[in-house]
Image (cartoon, helix red, strand yellow):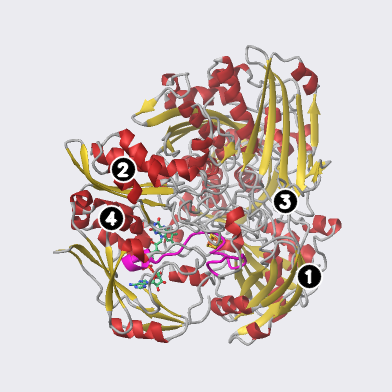
Amino acid sequence: MENEPAFFETSPTPGVVGKPLNRVDGRDKVMGKAKYSAEYPLPGLVYGVLKTSDIAKGRVQSIDTSLAMKEPGVVQILTHLNLPKLAKTPNDPEGKKAIGAPMGFLPMTSDVIHYAGQPVALVVADTFERATQAAALVRVNYAAEAPIAAYTDKRARLFNPEKIQDGKQDGYTRRGDAQAALASAPIKLTATYTHAINHHNPMEPGATTAIWEAPDRVTVYESTQGVTRTQKALAAYLGLPQDQVRVITKFLGGGFGCKGSCWPHTVLTVQAAKAVGRPVKLVLSRKQQFTSMGHREDQTQTLTLGASKEGKLLALIHEKTSTTSPWDNYAEANSKIINLLYDSPTFESHYELGRANVMTSTFTRAPGEAPGSFAIECSMDDLAYQLGIDPIEIRLRNYAEKDPSTGQPWSSKSLRQCYARGAELFGWSKRNPKAGATRNGRLLVGYGMATASYPVHNSQGTARVRLYADGHAVVQAGATDLGTGTYTVMTQVAADSLGLAPDKIRFELGDTKLPTAPNSGGSVAAGTVSSSVYMAAQDVWERLTKVAIKDPKSPLFQAKAEDVTAENGRLQLKKDAAKGEHFMALMKRAGMDDIEGSGQGKYGAGYETGRPSNPAGPQNNTESEAKHSMHSFGAHFCEVQVDPDLGTVRVTRWVSVHGAGRILNAKTARSQIIGGSIFGIGAALMEATARDPHYARYTNADLGDYHIPVNADIPDMTVEFIDEHDPYINAMGVKGIGEISMVGVTAAVANAVFHATGKRVRDLPITPDKILSTKSV
Amino acid sequence: MNNFSYLQTSQAKDATAAVAGTKGAAFIAGGTTVLDLMKLNVENHSQLVDINMVPFKGIEQTADGLRIGALERMSDVGEHPLVVQNYPVISQALLLAASPQLRNMASIGGNLLQRTRCGYFRDVAFPCNKRNPGSGCPAQEGENRNLAILGGSKACIATHPGDLGVALAALDAVLLLENAKGKQRRVPLVDFHVVPGNTPQRETVLEPGELIVSVTVPAAAHARKSKYLKVRDRASYAFALASAAVGLDVQSGQIRSARVALGGVGTKPWRSVAAEKILTGAPATEATFRAAAAAALRDAQPREQNRFKVELAQNTLVRALLELSAA
Ligand SMILES: Cc1cc2nc3c(=O)[nH]c(=O)nc-3n(C[C@H](O)[C@H](O)[C@H](O)COP(=O)(O)OP(=O)(O)OC[C@H]3O[C@@H](n4cnc5c(N)ncnc54)[C@H](O)[C@@H]3O)c2cc1C
Ligand code: SF4
């Protein structure tokens, strides 16, 4: 980091970064010109439709496709009997690793059924309707066995995994002697929290369009949060060199984590295209979406606090039990945030898993941090009430001045300001400290708050800038715009880095032909890609400086390169701004049409240590080598009004204040925080996928019965950011905001419900039945 | 969804003849139920007979009361001044249902014939007595949070999910039906839907090919002073966990006549004569309302996940009566 220029120093003049620029792709989206992955009308395109398993456990005894094959327009029906062979599958650990698969099982590679909704056949026909009809006519005979639906089933085998998430996280963590500290703590609190199954349900379902350009070369238009990760996965599946697989994602209709990996339907579609020798498009139905791209697992957490009478934490012990699939030890790592949010001298965490007939769960917005914060932030609230201390005050008494889990100092932390500003905006001081004591007619009014935090995951990526002598630029990085504004913010960064107006920049993304960017997941995209773009621009300036100092006609002739700086498109002397010229003049005189530069952006620990790591994912171990612990922090404030007789809870006011480094675009950032908060309000009050306990099959897999918030559920929301300058995290000083926006939200709502009613509902979502059946304390 | 043929006609007799005479044929009005279920393969009609051109229209005050053509749209009826002023419970039930897009398509006749949201019914991979008689009812021991506590049987506890039927049940509405022979008959709404018993596949008394022509609602003081209260998991666009349609005629604090029906809790729109008996002649007080609510739910048979509905339905009814009597 010492040798790298930083945006703060090189772009001191106010530009467009940070301004509430409208989305540069907004018009195309409104006009229907933005093409999503299922919207490429390739010549000869045929349509794939999945047939999925009725049963959750057993075997396919026989498949009769004869009736379906007779339907007009049917081209091919793939089953486990005729699926073209793959070079690797995730069915063994080595294959899973090579592919980077989210699940250690690929359907249709044998007759075995492990979960309801598992693909058993893929029908290809000349229209979507005919493929759908034919899929209904495929007759599958199953030898069914009794499935296990969840870890709560008495027959489920519970075990303590040594590692979770393919070895990336420990199944047991211990810092100090939490048990001893608890034993001698004057205050002890234990509470158990449960979280329903949640599905991401992006507006755009999973979608793949695959076209084999040559027998050993395939192009895939894919609805993914990372073209490179999908490219690597498919290359491993197919046994092709990575550059023979091209993945394109120009627009994405949301992902929330479910599009962070390459799931079975993608490779099955690629194989179908191979089998029929024509491009094949497959779009998951909404119902299939519930069993194709993972979910947030059903889970129980028990959190035990030991504290002094003054409310100072002495011990934290966290246990989590959750459902996982027959093959993988996946669990959201809830304990991480609990380990670092407050200054507790001791900590212990255990994970326990129960195998069931479900697909593997996966990262869902703020994986781990969201449910983990529910437990710790509700328990801190309980502690505050028990001791008669204000909920903000109890948090300040336990304020972590450095990262308790590692001992590292924070790279930046504006949490105190977030509490103070949030409280002021919300009117926290008007709160009656007594629960159940504030009324609005028949309704009970409650105020709740919670802390948010999310790590700056180590990541890196590259970008390319081509600057033209006529004053415009094309900027490229193989990043993804989840719909949240990557196109827009990168245009802003490029504009300021190059001294051009935003309308002179074209930013291109979403293609493995472009320089590699990380997956848009773990909130790494904004920080990494913006740094890459900025560094690529610096590369252009360096190259042009070399030209200028050798050009006798340039005012910078024979200047020292290190004395030259770029500002507003001008190369000039640092000490004498008048001495210099605009790049257009320089390039014209030199007869240059354009000039290209590229740059690598590092985000997080890799930036500080100078030692980057795996660009395809946020998980790594460089973090412990960095001097600083890097996190965003924030606070949510919530007012609810609860009808005590009808059990309905309405969120009536909302304030979120975050310290998340440099904000690239005030408007898209605000939208991110609003979106994440609404996501959390959904999880808090209504989102729950119901899995039948006997059939291990979902009973509400549609958006009529799986409730997400509608407009009427959401009040006007106030969002602010604390001005934060963090020089340690990346060249731009940017932290991500996609995930932190949802952390702490469920707790803020639950805490408000408690304040309103005196009822502590620890079982999400907080639906009317739970308000009615929970007793006040 | 299977392939099907499509017939459009403006003549009721052609429509009824086509559906009565063709195996697997069904009417389509707004299509928001029938197409949904066909896409799920829950219904597999060989032919759809489009009745949208059949002139079963009109929202008007007649000597008998309010007459609504079966092909009027939910939104048009819900917003009609006559309905808003003289039959507010009907207007509110309609406007609190579904979404604006659905209400703009969905018809009055179709609404009364919508089918349960029971998750087992809507997924053909499950057994379900209603969809596949004799196959079993996994809801009894399974996901039954949104299912009925009144009118269920060992064979089926599916809720009638609609709102309009509840308001119409309260107000003594009568349906005019017409069969393939052109013969018309009148059936009170409360007798139109039937409880599941041992034949949950049979939901109404409608004969094959018979059409709903119109709905008539008698004018009454308890219709003018009426209210629909709906409790659900989110603020809008969700089916009722419990709802109450109530009408009251109160003179100097005494209830002269009362109408009560419950939604979200019954296997059919659930009129409660027991509650009405307690209300009629009694003072319009919370104590009376509580007693009426207890009577309305006396026969409730909750399952594991829907036990809360016993209390919720009572509270919903009490609240509706309190708000109505205070208005
Ligand atoms: C997501 C969603 C949410 C919903 N939420 C609600 C809600 O909150 N409250 C609520 O009340 N409803 C709700 N509905 C149901 C909706 O109101 C019904 O689908 C709609 O009213 C059906 O009317 P339609 O005209 O579209 O019927 P269609 O789908 O056209 O027909 C339904 C059935 O009735 C038959 N039919 C139609 N008209 C006649 C007639 N005149 N005579 C004889 N048979 C006829 C058809 O053959 C078919 O069997 C919801 C629906 C959806 C999809
Ligand atoms: S309750 Fe009725 S509709 Fe639901 S599964 Fe049982 S029989 Fe089928």
The stretch of residues the image draws in magenta is B105-131
Q: Is A694 situated left or right of A499 in this image?
A: right
Q: Which of marks 1 and 3 is in front?
A: 1
| Pointer 3 residue Cβ closer than 8 Å to ligand 1 | no
Chain letter for the residue marked with disc 1 in the picture: A
Name the residue: 65% across, 71% down.
A51
Picture quarter with the C terminus of chain B: top left
Image position of B25 with respect to A716: above or below: below
Q: Mark 3 highlights which residue?
A: A616
Q: Nearer the viewer, mark 4 or mark 1?
A: 4
Kindly check if marks 4 and 2 are in contact, taking CB atoms under 8 A apart as contact: no
Q: Residues within 10 Å of mark 2 (few under 14, many from 20)?
A: many
Chain letter for the residue marked with disc 3 in the picture: A
Q: Mark 4 highlights which residue?
A: B90
Name the residue: 29% across, 70% down.
B71
Q: Nearer the viewer, mark 2 or mark 3?
A: 2
Are the residues flagged by discs 4 and 1 from a single subunit?
A: no
Q: Which amino acid does label 3 sit on?
A: Ala
Kindly check if marks 2 and 3 are in contact, taking CB atoms under 8 A apart as contact: no
Residue A629 seen anywhere in this rendered image of the structure: no
Where residue A239 sits, quadrant-wise, is bottom right
Q: Residues within 10 Å of mark 3 (few under 14, many from 20)?
A: many
| Pointer 2 residue Cβ closer than 8 Å to ligand 1 | no
Q: What residue type is labelled 2?
A: Ile
What's the distance in space between the residues labelled 4 and 1, CA to CA?
54 Å
